[in-house]
Amino acid sequence: MKDISTPIPMTRFVRQIGLAMAVAACYAAPAAIAASPDVPKYPARPVRIVIGFTPGGVPDVSARLIAAWLTESWKQQVIVDNRPGAGGTIAGQIVAGANPDGYTLLSVSNAHSVAAAIYSKLPYDTVRDFAGITMTASGPALLLVPPGLGTKSVKDLIALARSRPGQLNFSSAGVGSGSHFAGELFKSAAGIDAVHIPLKGIPEAITETMAGRVHFFMSPLASAIGLVKEGKVPAIAVTSLQRVPQLPAVPTVAESGLPGFRWDYWYGILAPAKTPRPIIVLLNQEITRALEQPEVGGRLSALGAEPAPTTPQAFDAFISKDIATLTAVARKEKITAQ
């Protein structure tokens, strides 16, 4: 079996530095930008956060938690707008083409980088057409299997797949989504053949797995932890290099026969390129403040998505590096958006 590692998330040191910088900056921030000849008072009307997936996934949940806190803090409505499809690229196209005034934002995940790595053509430039505001959180995946499949471990799943070549399948939140890439990466590392079943979002992918219509799914920890704890769907492994405290009995993929295997989901907020810098700075400071609150960051942590705010510059640099890393992996493993 292949030894494969995807060094995608930031190190703990970089997270701590990014958090410290963002927290330090927030104390010098006003709650809104005063009107000036170049930048009007912001926000002066409702702000929209566009999400490329159906409700219930972490990009949606995290955006809704942040939107609720900002609405209360600003006394100005922040609206969540789900525009699922094409691995998040429909939402990306909407925001890339929006007026760069701070009133249309994009909630993103790994899918933002994955799309750049596996699509031959996109309706926008993943780097040049967006401005990073901040990463919001990150967390590993759970390898879910149907309750009646009879697989108790990664080794069981691999053995089953090898005994039935081409007959197993796996679900994802859509072609080009992070869960699509994670599933393909697992296939390659395990040396198995399985058919990709793209769905509209993470909740649908989990539902199809629970129902036994698909054989495995690389779900974000935060999206499935409740169902796993309730015994509704088995998690046979976690994709971090160490076991997670929320589910200490669940082994890692790496310790289950695929040494070095690692996958982490990350989440963040972007704005259209050319959004005025004072608005980017304000949004960074306000979202960082939101992530410090128990009703936002605390809830994400309980779900297994640890808050990980960064500066805008650090988030832009992270995305560029992430795209380069995923592109190299996609070429090596021959992962494409078919």
Image (cartoon, helix red, strand yellow):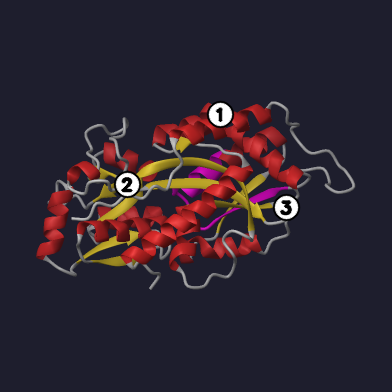
Magenta stretch encompasses residue 204:
no
Q: Position of residue 96 (x, y in %)?
A: 64, 62
Q: What residue is disc 2 on?
A: 262
Which type of secondary structure does the marked residue at label 3 adopt? Answer: loop
* Label 3 sits on residue: 275
Percent position (x, y) of residue 30? 76, 31
Which residues make up the magenta segment?
Answer: 46-65
The residue drawn where x is 47% and y is 57% is: 324
Q: Amino acid at mark 2?
A: Arg
Q: Is residue 295 shown above or below 173?
A: above
> In the image, what residue type sits under mark 3?
Thr
Give the quadrant of the C terminus.
bottom left
Q: Is residue 335 above or below residue 318?
A: below
Left or right? Give the position of 171 relative to 175.
left
Label located before the other in sequence (2 or 3): 2
The residue labelled by disc 1 is 292
